Image: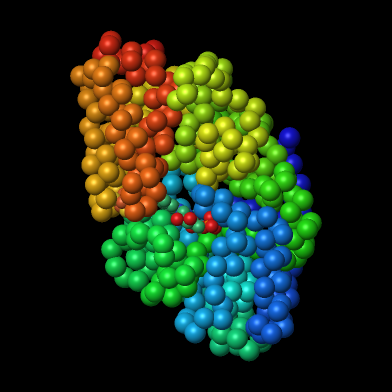
Amino acid sequence: MIVNDLPTKLLDGAYTKGEWSLENYLKKGGYQAAKKVLAMPRDPAANNIPALIEEVKKSNLRGRGGAGFPAGMKWQFIDYKAKKPRYLAVNCDESEPGTCKDRVVVTYNPHRVLEGILIACHVCGIEDAYIYIRGEFVVEFEHLVGAVAEAYAAGYFGSNAMGSGVRIDVTPHRGAGAYICGEETGLLSSLEGDRGYPKIKPPFPAVEGAWRSPTLINNTQTIALLPGIVNMGADAWAKIGPERNSGPMIYCLSGHIKKPGLFELTMDVTLRELVEQCGGGVLNDLKPKAIIPGGSSMPVLRVDGQPYTNAKGEQVTDNYDIRMDYDTLKNANTLLGSAAVIVMHERTCMVSALYNLIRFYHHESCGQCTPCREGSGWLEKILARIVRGEGKTEDIDGLLSVAGQMSGTTICLLADSAAMPAGAFITKFREEFVHFCKEKKSMVENAIRL
Ligand SMILES: Cc1cc2nc3c(=O)[nH]c(=O)nc-3n(C[C@H](O)[C@H](O)[C@H](O)COP(=O)(O)O)c2cc1C
Ligand code: SF4
């Protein structure tokens, strides 16, 4: 079911020139939510701050950065009474292939992000916020800097933010051009001026993050959703979409699709509806074969109706009519991730598609952990051999063995991000890998080159 007459939207006015100005944002009721929240004193005795965290928990807001972690729960981990500075880092690195939503939110609705920052900072007792924005986002960065200047001039930020008597400052910080800087601890290393190396958790950033102080890290979209929750009230917001999967979701539709783009909907939508109704169907009216539901690191779904043998040895078929929410996709052994839906049609060679994807992960591995550095390298080397027509059928189980040894053994989840798609591609399309090894060419006639 497609529900897009949402009471609160981040993409309102997207792609309209000038939409990003403060004047326009105020016309739409902008900064009212922040005004309401900042009017509450930061007084632990008044007990209003925990009450606000309860509101976020009640809303069922789940982080839009990939893991779908409950935002209110994360906020609760920040000790706002601690005698240390606390920081907010807004993650706008957006490097996961297929994901392209934060950049649009920041370009056309930057004040919504800034309003969300004011709310998050006040609720968690934070005075300094950073927006870590991907280095390649030039126009996006300019819009953000312009909006920050407007917000300071209006007195929303600074030593007396919105007349509240508390200081809240915000600094856009340009990223260092590496996928790994989107991983939260890598981001903090980069923000501190070091190489973007991820760090072992625990301690989690909420306890010990930037400059060894408690740091809240949320995705840009997560932060931008906050004014809507305050304006509507958590109970009403929680009712948008399926239970536990509340609020608007921005689906990024790409790949072999007639109308790629962003679609802001409730999470009631099915995969088929996204492709056929939102995306206008598959390119050249071909049949869909495989769809990655949540960014390139999430396990692919096989949607051509053909059964495959899963890890338990059962014959199963993936459901093209699956509901695109966190819980339903998890139950189907994949993940919603960043809701980046990548469509591959029937002329896609799954072997070369996986090779293409693994090259990315190998290139982006920071090299600290042996299983990730060597494992992604071996996956790439073996796949290259198969694609060159020099593979042997034993290589297929070799790939699965390497992928199996990468998961759960590293500092961050980049290794899993390579291992998960490798496992799913091979398990679900094993016949294509076998054919390539035996016949020295793709099983797909007139396969498109990736
Ligand atoms: C390799 C890797 C890359 C990531 N890249 C991003 C990214 O570009 N943007 C993002 O918001 N989260 C990214 N994440 C997730 C972050 O580590 C973190 O969980 C997220 O920013 C938290 O925000 P949320 O709770 O609002 O979802 C990445 C994670 C991993 C393991
Ligand atoms: S898993 Fe990979 S990217 Fe993450 S810290 Fe280890 S080597 Fe670096």
Q: Nearer the viewer, residue 441 or 321?
A: 321
Residue visible at 26% across and 14% down?
Answer: 440
Q: Is 240 displayed left or right of 127 in the figure? A: right
Residue 306 at least partly seen:
yes
Q: Position of residue 42 (x, y in %)?
A: 65, 83
Q: Position of residue 142 (x, y in %)?
A: 47, 66
Residue visible at 43% across and 40% down?
Answer: 297
Residue 170 at least partly seen:
no
The image's colouring method is rainbow
Image quadrant holding the C terminus, namely top left
Q: Position of residue 424 (x, y in %)?
A: 43, 29
Residue visible at 60% across and 70% down?
Answer: 120
User: Please, which residue is most extreme toward the front here?
Assistant: 312
Q: Nearer the viewer, residue 257 or 436?
A: 436
In the image, residue 95 sits, relative to residue 122, either above or below, namely: above
Q: Position of residue 422 (x, y in %)?
A: 38, 32
Image quadrant holding the N terminus, namely top right
User: Please, which residue is most extreme toward the top here?
Assistant: 439
Residue visible at 26% across and 19% down?
Answer: 394
Q: Nearer the viewer, residue 259 or 427?
A: 427
For the image shown, how many numbered marks are present on the structure? 0
Q: Nearer the viewer, residue 154 or 352?
A: 352
